[in-house]
Image: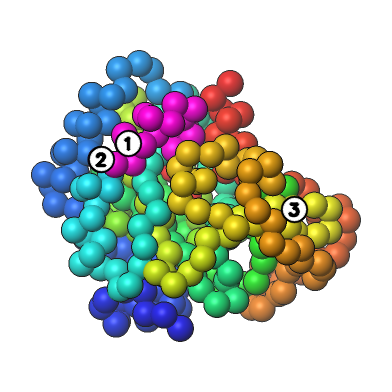
């Protein structure tokens, strides 16, 4: 298995727990990113907001370029033979009253061979009232599954149970949560008058090809993907743009090691096949 982090001990923790929290940005870097955010956002921020979802591609890229510029030294310091995908501001204001439910991020590599990650860095100190992030240690190893638009989320009926078993990470500005895209994570609503400004950045091993998984009933279509598609395309519309390489048929979920509170998870019952928790659709709904 590819060693992701240069520090072997941290890499082992990432492998076993699915996440690590590390000091990542200097105070002046945090200030640079916060100042840049406010210089470029002069109007009111909706409840939940991500620059990666802006329809203005030039603006999306401008935000990405700045984040990448500030992150690069730390990425090089922490990561071993990995490629940078791109970055986004992720901001919560008090207009978003609902919590961000427990979810896994989309699969973007062949997870039978590789792992992919996010680096999530708050630019303000976090506590429960202003939108702290929550995780379940080891949850990246619960199942093998495919995640992407139109793919059912077999865990949706366990949202509350998973939430109850999460640990809250009250991170300091500039610390990074490096997490496996399979890890269940969520966040509290921000109940304060100040914005909760954070940044998020994707990472994959150098040798991993990017893929896009799109559900079609009980099957999943696999498309070749790229950083350009994620940064510049409409990521809900992969099938219209990308090259399809194969179709995967059932079983789409392989249960490995479920905790006791969801051990009755059924991946066969029709009624469980509600839509995947789709981060993008959630964001779009909140914008309206
Ligand atoms: O910013 C947050 O509160 C959570 C972000 C998140 O869940 C994600 O980027 O997948």
What is the secondary structure assignment of the residue under circle 2?
helix
Can residue 198 be seen here? The reply is no
In the image, farthest residue toward the left: 28
Please name the predominant secondary structure of the magenta segment in the image.
Answer: helix
The residue at 88%/56% (across/down) is: 270
Q: Residue 215: which numbered mark, if any?
A: 3
Count neighbours of disc 1 (C-alpha within 10 A) and say few if under 14, some if 14 to 19, many if 20 or more: many
Q: Position of residue 273 (x, y in %)?
A: 80, 53
- Residue with the mark numbered 1: 63
Q: Are marks 1 and 2 in contact (CB under 8 Å)?
A: yes
Element on which disc 1 rests: helix
Look at the numbered disc 3 and give the secondary structure of its residue. Answer: strand
Task: Give the alpha-carbon distance from disc 2 to disc 3, as whole Å.
Answer: 34 Å
Q: Which residues are magenta?
A: 48-66
Q: Could you tell me which quadrant the N terminus lies in?
A: bottom left
Q: Tell me where residue 158 sits by quadrant.
A: bottom right
Residue wearing tag 2 = 66
Callout 2 crowding tier (Cα within 10 Å): few <14, some 14–19, many ≥20: some
Query: Residue placed farthest to the front in the image?
Result: 243
């Amino acid at each position: 298995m590819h060693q992701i982090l240069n520090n072997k001990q941290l890499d082992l923790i990432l492998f076993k727990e699915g996440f690590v929290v590390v000091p990542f940005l200097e105070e002046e870097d945090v200030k640079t990113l916060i100042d840049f955010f406010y210089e470029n956002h002069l109007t009111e921020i909706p409840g939940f907001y991500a620059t990666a979802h802006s329809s203005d591609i030039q603006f999306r890229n401008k935000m990405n370029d700045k984040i990448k510029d500030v992150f690069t030294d730390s990425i090089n310091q922490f990561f071993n033979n990995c490629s940078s995908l791109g970055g986004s501001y992720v901001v919560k204001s008090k207009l978003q009253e609902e919590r961000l439910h427990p979810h896994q991020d989309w699969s973007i590599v062949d997870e039978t061979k590789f792992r992919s990650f996010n680096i999530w860095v708050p630019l303000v100190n976090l506590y429960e009232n202003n939108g702290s992030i929550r995780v379940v240690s080891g949850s990246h190893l619960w199942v093998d599954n495919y995640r992407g638009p139109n793919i059912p989320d077999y865990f949706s009926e366990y949202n509350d149970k998973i939430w109850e078993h999460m640990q809250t990470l009250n991170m300091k500005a500039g610390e990074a949560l490096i997490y496996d895209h399979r890890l269940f994570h969520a966040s509290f609503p921000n109940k304060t008058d100040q914005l909760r400004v954070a940044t998020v950045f994707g990472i994959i091993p150098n040798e991993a090809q990017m893929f896009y998984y799109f559900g079609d009933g009980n099957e999943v279509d696999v498309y070749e993907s790229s950083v350009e598609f994620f940064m510049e395309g409409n990521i809900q519309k992969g099938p219209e743009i990308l090259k399809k390489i194969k179709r995967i048929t059932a079983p789409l979920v392989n249960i490995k090691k479920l905790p006791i509170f969801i051990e009755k998870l059924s991946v066969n019952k029709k009624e469980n096949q509600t839509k995947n928790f789709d981060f993008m659709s959630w964001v779009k709904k909140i914008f309206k």
